[in-house]
Image (spheres, helix red, strand yellow):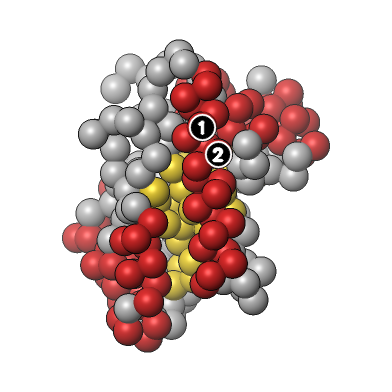
């Protein structure tokens, strides 16, 4: 499965984040030996525990909702934080990154689904964040793009529209706020059930768990 996925993603120059949450380090090493280096987790403690025992050339991506009081656990090593959904969270990331003498790459999470349970900003909130003096003063975070999760539904058309919406948001933000910043180029969208649609709609990063590791029990 991994090789097949990598071939298709490579053709579109998209990045694979292998979502290893709930799976033990041995399973991660299976994919590591096949060349995979980017892994995604959604719990800071779990990611820290795995970081401590696994090879140091793994790039760890925190993909799920992140509480401000957990940022310090992962700030020393996290490669990218996908789900920034408030100025307060970004401020904490900036603060912890500074303590560790690093710059942490982040994505802004947008609310694109028709499900109340999902997190994320709307476009106005993002604009407010990007224009705030607090954001402008930050020196230890680098915004690299956007992230979103589509509605969990069989309606392909709805999912496609939601991905298209995220792509449009990305283009508008790029033009308004990041026109001169090549690092702002990622659209993190697509999971096991909808990654082909996401690629068709311009995803640059897919986050895939169950397709690679099998169903999660937890
Ligand atoms: C778990 C998770 C994924 C991967 O989900 P699969 O359906 O197993 O591919 C992707 N993104 C986020 C934010 C997740 O929490």
Contact between marks 1 and 2 (CB within 8 A): the answer is: yes
Among the 4 quarters of the image, the one containing residue 57: bottom right
Mark 1–mark 2 Cα distance, whole angstroms, equals 5 Å
Q: Is residue 99 visible?
A: no
In the picture shown, does residue 113 fall above or below 81?
above
Residue 145 percent across, percent down from the top left: 53, 58
Q: Residue at x 75, y 30 (%)?
A: 8
Work out whether residue 184 or residue 216 is closer to the camera in this orientation and state it. 184
Work out whether residue 197 or residue 122 is closer to the camera in this orientation and state it. 122
- What is the quadrant of the C terminus in the image? top left
| 131 relative to 117 in the view: left or right | right
Q: Is residue 127 visible?
A: yes
| 68 relative to 52 in the view: left or right | left
Residue 148 percent across, percent down from the top left: 44, 42
- What is the quadrant of the N terminus in the image? top right
Residue 144 percent across, percent down from the top left: 54, 62
In the picture shown, does residue 143 fall above or below 154?
below
Mark 1 element type: helix
- Which mark, by number, is residue 164? 2
Among the 4 quarters of the image, the one containing residue 69: bottom left
Q: Residue at x 24, y 67 (%)?
A: 88
- Which mark, by number, is residue 161? 1
Bin the neighbour count of mark 2 within 10 Å (Cα to Cα): few under 14, some 14-19, many 20 and up: some
Q: Residue at x 29, y 72 (%)?
A: 91
**The furthest residue to the left:** 69
């Amino acid at each position: 499965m991994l090789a097949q996925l990598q071939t298709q993603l490579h053709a579109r120059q998209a990045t694979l984040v292998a979502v290893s949450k709930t799976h033990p380090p041995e399973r991660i090493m299976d994919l590591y030996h096949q060349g995979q280096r980017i892994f995604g987790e959604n719990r800071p403690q779990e990611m820290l525990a795995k970081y401590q025992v696994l090879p140091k050339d793994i790039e760890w991506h925190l993909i799920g909702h992140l509480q401000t009081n957990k940022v310090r656990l992962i700030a020393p090593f996290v490669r990218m934080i996908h789900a920034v959904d408030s100025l307060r969270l970004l401020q904490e990331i900036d603060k912890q990154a500074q303590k560790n003498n690093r710059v942490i790459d982040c994505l802004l999470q947008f609310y694109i689904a028709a499900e109340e349970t999902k997190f994320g900003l709307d476009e106005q909130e993002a604009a407010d964040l990007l224009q705030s003096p607090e954001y402008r003063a930050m020196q230890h975070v680098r915004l690299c793009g956007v992230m979103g999760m589509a509605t969990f539904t069989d309606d392909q058309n709805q999912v496609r529209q939601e991905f298209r919406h995220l792509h449009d948001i990305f283009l508008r933000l790029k033009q308004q706020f990041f026109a001169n910043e090549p690092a702002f180029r990622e659209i993190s969208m697509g999971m096991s059930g909808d990654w082909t649609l996401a690629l068709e709609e311009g995803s640059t990063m897919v986050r895939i768990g169950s397709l690679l590791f099998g169903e999660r029990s937890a």
